[in-house]
Image (cartoon, rainbow, N blue to C red):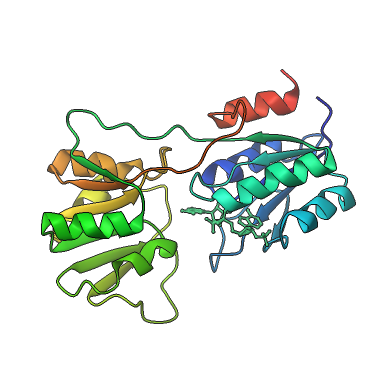
Amino acid sequence: MTANNILILGGTAEAATIAERLAGGDHHVITSLAGRTRAPRAVAGEVRIGGFGGVAAMTDYLRDKRIDAVIDATHPFATQISANAVAACDAAGVRRLQLVRPAWQATTDDNWIEVEDGRAAAQAIRDGGYARAFLATGRQELPAFEQMPDVRFLVRLVDQPDQPLALADYDVVAGRGPFVEIEERALLGDQRIDVIVAKNAGGAGSWPKMAAARELGLPVIMIRRTMEPGDDPAASVEEVLKWIAGA
Ligand code: NAP
């Protein structure tokens, strides 16, 4: 496949790895970030930051920049941008490949309570009578956990918040993956966490908290994916690179 101008929809470690692996090659690579974090991780090649302004504007962008291929390497819970990419690539006649990390699977060593969304996760905390929850869901899910004065939350966010969070009782720990199991275990133990709330993000970078939960015998309230990957998604960075190379 000839793809001189490649747009990577990013915001994940995999997107940064793809940009890094393509940098210095024959392609012109632009990574697009939503601009949600204060100091995004360093990305090789050109970077643009901020929403496009919807499907029509993304379509115009693809045409203006003469984009030959789009790699949608966004997070599996970032469903709007992926839907927009499908529509804009169709409209502009641009090839698109989505990278979808395989979801994590529970084994008999895990104690997962699978739920549909943040509200159901909050209800599962109430139902379980948990008192100290580690919220590793990201900022967007936080409203579901307001009005829960009996629960002490440890909230992990990429950036320390500028404003107080609207949670009754909480602490924030700032951090960006990849995480390390031994540190995750220490954090959970030191904070006397009795339940973890997570999204089924898949991938290696956020897995260590799951490994730590398994090791400590902690329950995990796992928010399922709602995304419906399009046709033939790639499951790894290597598959994306092969697609780019035309293999
Ligand atoms: P989303 O709900 O799917 O997208 C909402 C809007 O944000 C999009 O319509 C688009 O605005 C803009 N946007 C999202 N990703 C963009 C990108 N890579 N480049 C340019 N604009 C983008 O997205 P989200 O869940 O808020 O996630 C935002 C970003 O954070 C994504 O890039 C994702 O990879 C990353 N991320 C998300 C999660 C998560 O749990 N959702 C976790 C880790 C990282 P316009 O319509 O104006 O173009």
Name the quadrant containing residue 56: bottom right
Ligand 1 located in image quadrant:
bottom right
The answer to whether 212 appears left or right of 237 in the picture is left
Residue 83 on image: x %, y %: 63, 46
Instruction: Specify the farthest residue to the bottom.
Output: 163
Q: Nearer the viewer, residue 100 or 204?
A: 100
Q: Nearer the viewer, residue 232 or 180?
A: 232
The answer to whether 144 appears left or right of 13 in the picture is left
Vertical placement of residue 189 versus 149, above or below: above
Residue 151 on image: x %, y %: 17, 68
* Quarter of the figure that contains the N terminus: top right
Instruction: Specify the farthest residue to the top.
Output: 247
Name the quadrant containing residue 114: top left
The answer to whether 39 appears left or right of 65 in the picture is left
Q: How many numbered dots are placed on residues in this image?
A: 0
The answer to whether any part of residue 96 appears in the image is yes
Residue 108 on image: x %, y %: 18, 28
Report the residue at 50% width, 44% height from top: 76
* Quarter of the figure that contains the C terminus: top right
Q: Nearer the viewer, residue 82 or 169?
A: 82
The answer to whether 92 appears left or right of 243 in the picture is right
The answer to whether any part of residue 11 appears in the image is no
Vertical placement of residue 35 versus 212, above or below: below
Report the residue at 33% width, 65% height from top: 144
Report the residue at 62% width, 28% height from top: 231
Report the residue at 66% width, 42% height from top: 19
